Every structure is written in C-alpha cells, then in structure tokens.
Image (cartoon, helix red, strand yellow):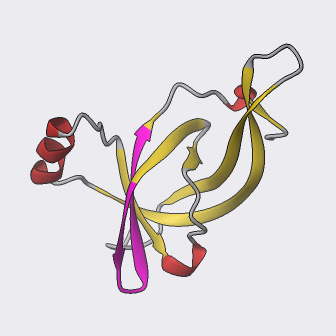
C-alpha cells in the first residue's frame, strides 16, 4: 500500500434523537453516505490533549473535503463513532472520532 492511499471505508451518518410511541428515546436515520478515507495515527500531542479535555480519540482519518457533509457520526466496520473534531487541510478534512455505545440496531431505518 502506498503512503496516503485510501485504506478505510466508512459511512457518514446523520441521525436525530427522537421519542417513540412509548416515550423512550431512539435514533432516526436522516442520511448516510459511504466514503473512502485515509486512516492515520494520532500523534502523542493529540493523545495527551484529548486526555486533558476528557475526549477520547479512537480513530483519526482524512477524507476529501467535498465528501464531508457535516455528519456527526460515522459507521466503521459496524461500529458507530462520534465525530468529535474536524480540521480542514487543503483538499482534505481530518476527522477525529470516538467510539460510542450506539449499536446499528438502535438506529431506525439503518441497514
């Protein structure tokens, strides 16, 4: 594999937290888009900064800027991640993600 070549497939997910008929909260899928990105390592400085701010970063990746639609969640290999932070770098945008406890089965209309 060449450096900086796409090596991770993910789905950007937009969803809302809604109440169902019995009053409990559930997630409703609004939009999803499959994209390919470049996975990269988190630097030690970023790791310590995330620990200091009580934000655990589990995955860092880059995608082309025009592909990012402002989604707040992503599905990587069946695990749902929250997009904690984004950083624009030229034609790419870096996404910093933390793993959530949300399961795919918790999201209405998600396949």
Q: Where is residue 83 in the image (x, y as percent from the top left)?
A: 46, 50
33 lies above or below 49:
below
Q: Residue at x 58, y 41 (%)?
A: 77
Asked which quadrant contains residue 2, the reply is bottom left
Q: Which residue is drawn at 85% across and 39% down?
A: 109
Q: Does the magenta stretch include residue 94?
A: yes
Asked which quadrant contains residue 50, the reply is top left
Count of marks overlaid on the render: 0
Residue lying furthest right: 21
Magenta span = 85-98
Image-based side of 68 in relation to 41, left or right: right
The C terminus is located in which quarter? top right
Q: Position of residue 45 (x, y in %)?
A: 10, 52
63 lies above or below 98:
below
Image-based side of 3 in relation to 65, left or right: left
Q: Which residue is drawn at 40% across and 40% down?
A: 98
Q: Is residue 83 magenta?
A: no
Image-based side of 79 in relation to 106, left or right: left
Magenta stretch, overall SS: strand
The N terminus is located in which quarter? bottom left
């Amino acid at each position: 594999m060449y450096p900086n070549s796409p090596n991770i497939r993910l789905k950007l997910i937009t969803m809302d937290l809604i109440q169902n008929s019995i009053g409990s909260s559930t997630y409703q899928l609004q939009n999803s888009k499959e994209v390919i990105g470049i996975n990269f390592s988190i630097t030690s400085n970023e790791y310590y900064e995330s620990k200091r701010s009580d934000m655990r970063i589990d995955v860092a990746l880059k995608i082309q800027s025009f592909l990012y639609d402002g989604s707040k969640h992503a599905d990587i290999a069946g695990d749902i991640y929250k997009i904690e932070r984004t950083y624009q770098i030229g034609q790419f945008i870096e996404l910093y993600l933390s793993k959530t406890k949300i399961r795919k089965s918790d999201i209405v209309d998600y396949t």
